[in-house]
Amino acid sequence: MENESYAMKGGEGPNGYAQNSTWQRDAIEASKEMIHEAIAKNFDPRANVEPSSLIRIADFGCSTGPNTYLAMQNYNRSNRASIPIPGSCCSNARIPAGVPGFFHGRLFPRKTLHFAHSSAALSFLSKIPKEITDRDSSAWNKGRIHHTNAPKEVVDAYANQHKADLESFLDARAQELVDNGLMLLQIPVACDVILESDIDFGEVLELLESCLLEMTKVTSHREIFKMENESYAMKGGEGPNSYAQNSTWQRDAIEASKDMIHEAIAKNFDPRANVEPSSLIRIADFGCSTGPNTYFAVQTIIEAIELQFQSQRLVAQMPEFQVFFNDQVSNDFNTLFKNLPLSRNYFAAGVPGFFHGRLFPRKTLHFAHSSAALSFLSKIPKEITDRGSSAWNKGRIHHTNAPKEVADAYANQYKADLESFLDARAQELVDNGLMLLQIPVACDVILESDVGSGEVLELLESCLLEMTKVGLNSISGTMLIARGCEAVLYVVH
């Protein structure tokens, strides 16, 4: 569908949605008891919950928070009161994911949602009715941004657009909700009878209109928000220094592993044994960054799976695909979502979080993939910065020509990180699920041609340290940079 709508103002500054949405929050607070009552009346835990005891809730039009968190907490408390929670301490865990896209169309696989919620978002139209801007139409609104005191034709044009949008929204959710699923929609409405006390509101809109039109005449602006970034996510955006423009090595590694991935899936993936009755396959890419490499990796996996169905003459049973893109909370998911392939054959979701811990419900993933991300450590080994330790690295940002104790400290941290990663995925993968890990490694034998890499690291170190002295940069800890002689693809079955 065509989309001409805009997202709310981001950030946490004084003009952000987060600081200017008290009315929306009040509406959610006011509906709390109605939500509890509706769930108590219509939700049957024995009929609605699948054997895996997993409930999926979607909030459409969530913006940047915090209101969406409150709305979801209302659902959680209602469900907790009515659902018999199994014994596991993690069974009532709330695992979030961000789903980019236009909610007037499909966003989820068929019959996967138990609850669909939307508050104050469905009052926004998907686009301006074309007759509103057509000078030859009786519904032409003369360039105005509202319909106060406008002809009936203008009001009708907006109403018809809202009707079409709502029908599209409901049709999409009808396909996504499980049998007996619930949908709770909170939609602001205008009164049929306008009270005298409300008439001044039209004057407010006219004043707002004049202000906004004046603002459009300004040809330049300055961004007034600047957020500090202390995370370790890759450089966002699409500029010359971004990850997107400086990740050809990573892409080459994925390209080189394409045949291995196809071979691994052909050998280890059985469509008859691996696909659940709902014919949905879930794939997660851990350490996705901002793209575009992650799109290529995911498409390679999907193509290999499709070939398996085709080779076994199961084309009629071809499943839907849902792909989860994971990276740290500070990752530039906006760039990732903006550049999602338009012709993709999967439903996309972003999952923020640290992949050395649990990110998904138990036994929900069919494929776990990671390329060039597991070589990064979760933290600096504490002994590296301890002056009293034999592994103290003297403030250096690499371990070239460092004592054995330094290399051992990094190796032990890497071992602990990899164990944590594998333990988390072991809980999240379905039986017979596959994990494909591409990890850059260093050679046991160093060739003469590789010796120069140490000199490059020492030069880089000296440059960065000089930059910190003039305030151009800051180094908060030790950074490990390693030039691998090859990348190893591990297939875990």
Image (tube, rainbow, N blue to C red):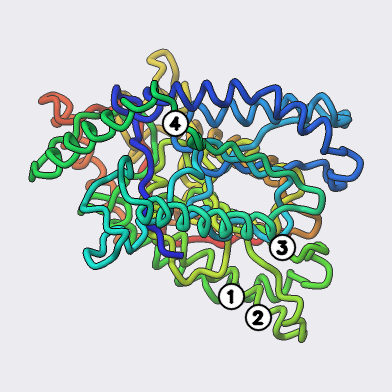
Q: Position of residue 242 (x, y in %)?
A: 27, 50
Under tag 3, what secondary structure?
A: strand
Residues at discs 4 and 2 in contact (Cβ within 8 Å): no
Residue shown at 17%/27% (left/top)? 468
Given the image, on which type of amino acid does mark 2 rest? Answer: Leu
- The reply to whether the C-beta atoms of the residues labelled 1 and 2 are less than 8 Å apart is yes
Q: Secondary structure at mark 1?
A: helix
CA gap, disc 3 and disc 1: 15 Å
In the figure, is residue 231 to the left or right of 220? right
Give the percent coordinates (x, y) of residue 230.
35, 28
Residue receiving disc 1:
303
Where residue 245 sits, quadrant-wise, is: bottom left
Residue 87 occupies quadrant:
top right
Q: N-terminal of the two: label 3 or label 2?
A: 3
The picture places residue 134, in percent across and down from the top left corner, at 26, 64
For label 2, the crowd category at 10 Å Cα-Cα, with few meaning under 14, some 14 to 19 and many 20 or more, is some
Q: Which mark is residue 280?
A: 3
**Residue under the point 71% across and 31% down:** 93
Q: From the image, state whether disc 3 or disc 4 is nearer to you.
A: 4
Q: Which residue is mark 2?
A: 307
Residue type at mark 3? Leu
Q: From this viewpoint, is residue 411 visible?
A: no
Q: CA distance from mark 3 to mark 4?
A: 50 Å
Distance in Å between CA atoms under marks 4 and 1? 58 Å
Q: Reading the chain from its start, which is encountered first: label 4 or label 1? A: 4
